[in-house]
Image (cartoon, helix red, strand yellow):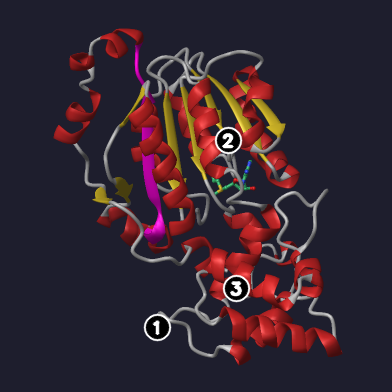
Amino acid sequence: MQRGHTPVLLHEALERLSVEPGGLYVDGTLGLAGHAAELLRRSAPDGRLLGLDRDGETLARAAETLRPFGTRVHLAQADFREAEQHLAGARPNGVLLDLGVNSVQLDSPERGFSFRFEGPLDMRLDRSRGVSAADVVQHLREDELADVIYRFGEEPASRRIARAIVAARQSQALTTTLALAEVVRRAAPRARRPGLDPATRTFQALRIHVNGELERLGDAMKHLAALLAEDGRLVVIAFHSLEDREVKHAFRALAAEGPFELLERRAVRPGDEELARNPRARSARLRALRRLRADEERDPRARSYSRRLAARRPDGRDEDEHDDASDARQEAA
Ligand SMILES: C[S@@+](CC[C@H](N)C(=O)[O-])C[C@H]1O[C@@H](n2cnc3c(N)ncnc32)[C@H](O)[C@@H]1O
């Protein structure tokens, strides 16, 4: 998540990626290239970056931002699940994923992510393909809608909301953000958490469903980890508990099966200073995994990284899992 292009957990992510000159890195969720630009600065003069984003409009902005880095940067409009196709057999020293949506997407009424503005109910990360949120709201059966809202929004009033949507769409198609938000608020006027808009969880759920955000996420972690060079890192920032849980389970399985280790057992959270600067970073959780070197595989006593890191941990606080299901990015919506 970022406001004014402030990347979340920037220092924590780049430290764990162990960025060095000459390295090859993948930013699988390039966004507005905040993490990527810093990564390129730290890996100067010859570190290289493959940047991927599903959103062609975002990618074009990022290309502008990264232009000063010239041929060190290669960009492609792609899902991070397709990273291997763009690596042409090369093994990255680090892969970063900062999941979710970026601030320009959230703040663009025409993208339909936000109930703060009137706009078409779209929500697709890649507007060149797929089915919009308006189509989903118009065509899913009531029980299917309730399932989506419950599973991806952890919304206790999912059935009531689905019933209200189906009733409303019989008189008029729900094609805009404000029309949907209004129906949700009438069906379930009080959010579980004070201060949270009652439409928050339903919007989050639709966005996750429309973009298949949780589909094969655990498998994607395993696939990306398998691509890493020796001592390579996979660093993932998640913004809601559903994503973070998938990442956590995949990382633990990888560390148990080898040849990987968790850099910390618990997720890293933004420190007080970052929260003061950027309160919307509140829900961010970072997890990092390292591929062992061949000598460490042979001799487990050589695996000293996590112990060293724990001894000099910066001000980032640790937490095992989200205590709050809501997605800060969606809260901002
Ligand atoms: C939170 S933003 C990343 C912000 C970025 N780290 C920065 O510093 O500017 C997430 C980005 O990932 C993209 N995205 C989401 N899911 C994706 C996926 N499966 N594959 C590729 N890009 C994805 C979104 O379009 C969005 O631009």
Q: Badge 1 is on which residue?
A: 194
Residue type pointed to by label 2: Gly
Asked if the stretch drawn in magenta spans residue 104, the answer is no
Q: Earlier in the sequence, mark 3 or mark 2?
A: 2
Q: Badge 2 is on which residue?
A: 28
Q: Earlier in the sequence, mark 2 or mark 1?
A: 2
Q: Badge 3 is on which residue?
A: 202
Residue type pointed to by label 3: Thr
Inter-mark Cα distance, 1 to 3 = 16 Å
Q: Is mark 2 within 8 Å of ligand 1?
A: yes
Closer to us: mark 1 or mark 3?
Answer: 3
Ligand 1 quadrant assignment? top right
Q: Residue at x 69, y 23 (%)?
A: 85
Q: Is residue 200 above or below residue 255?
A: below
Circle 2: element type: loop
Inter-mark Cα distance, 2 to 1 = 34 Å
Residue type pointed to by label 1: Pro
Tell me the magenta residue range: 282-293
- Crowding at dot 2, Cα within 10 Å, few <14 / some 14-19 / many 20+, comes out as many
Q: Nearer the viewer, residue 200 or 119?
A: 200
Q: Nearer the viewer, residue 61 or 120?
A: 120
Residue 241 at what x, y percent from top left?
Answer: 43, 58
Q: Residue at x 58, y 56 (%)?
A: 103
